[in-house]
Image (cartoon, rainbow, N blue to C red):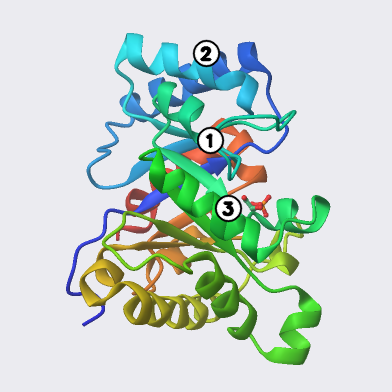
Amino acid sequence: MTGTVRRTPLIAGNWKMNLDHLQAIAFVQKLAWGLADAKHDVASVEVAVFPPFTDLRSVQTLVAADKLPIAFGAQDLSEHDSGAYTGEISGAFLSALDCSYVLIGHSERRTLHGESDEQVSGKVRAALRHNLVPIICVGETSDDLEKHGPSAVPVAQLKAALSGITSTVDIVVAYEPVWAIGSGQAATPEQAEQVAAALRAVLVDTLGEDVAQKTRILYGGSVKSSNIAGFMREPNVDGALVGGASLDLNEFTSIVRYQKHVGL
Ligand SMILES: O=C[C@H](O)COP(=O)(O)O
């Protein structure tokens, strides 16, 4: 069945804690100009950026005013909708800013902020309540890889993230091996495909064949313009979640335009 449904590739740039709102405006404007100059067709490859919370209103205003073909989203959200949760951001607020997506369960949230599988699951449900498409991040550490093999931990994380969700939903899954993030040592395309196929099997079991075939699975971890094409040739890899390279305009534009420079 895999490969019978066309899934629009998604190249997503996670800026992490980089670029303030003024830098964000300049960056998104230049990115849009670069893509327009290159006659990039967003129907063939969708582009999204994930700026810090404080940039979102500025990015929203720019994208709406200039009708830029760039989607945007937040890097996290609260599992709660409102209340006494100092420092937290509700999905309702992100929705009001026209965010399309929200990253959930990034390994930096899991490791630096102790985010549990239960919290990730609560955040997925919060995103869906507010019509945000969750990008559910899963991935194994090098220890996990050694002890349990490549798929066990990402599969368990995805099952936990989807607990209680059975209906038709619009989600994206991002497989990001922790050992590949920011290390310069990307997974091989074959490794990414092996885990992506296992994740798609989880989607089939939990959400059914139709949703599973429509759901995009991204690879993340040291993606660059020089290695993106290899990942995109894999049948179960539908895009990339890019960290460091998403902050370099030329490099990010080149990743988005992977089809051109490799003739895919
Ligand atoms: O969210 C993005 C990932 O953490 C990948 O980061 P990286 O491309 O800098 O390795």
Three-letter residue code for mark 1: Asp
What residue is shown with label 1?
81
What residue is shown with label 2?
58
Q: Residues within 10 Å of mark 3 (few under 14, many from 20)?
A: many
Q: Is residue 137 above or below residue 62?
A: below
Question: Considering the image in quadrants, where does the N terminus appear?
Answer: bottom left
Q: Which mark is residue 213?
A: none
Which residue sits at x=37%, y=58%? 262
Q: Residues within 10 Å of mark 1 (few under 14, many from 20)?
A: some
Q: Which mark is residue 224?
A: 3
Relative to residue 232, is residue 121 drawn left or right? right
Q: Nearer the viewer, mark 1 or mark 2?
A: 1
Q: Is residue 181 above or below residue 48?
A: below
**Could you say whether the residue bearing mark 3 is in a helix, strand or loop?**
loop
Q: Nearer the viewer, mark 3 or mark 1?
A: 1
Pointers 1 and 2 in contact (C-beta within 8 Å): no
Three-letter residue code for mark 3: Lys
Q: Residue 156 sits in which quadrant?
A: bottom right
Q: Give the Cα separation between the discs numbered 3 and 2.
A: 27 Å
**Could you say whether the residue bearing mark 2 is in a helix, strand or loop?**
helix
Q: Is residue 2 above or below residue 98?
A: below
Q: Give the Cα separation between the discs numbered 3 and 1.
A: 36 Å
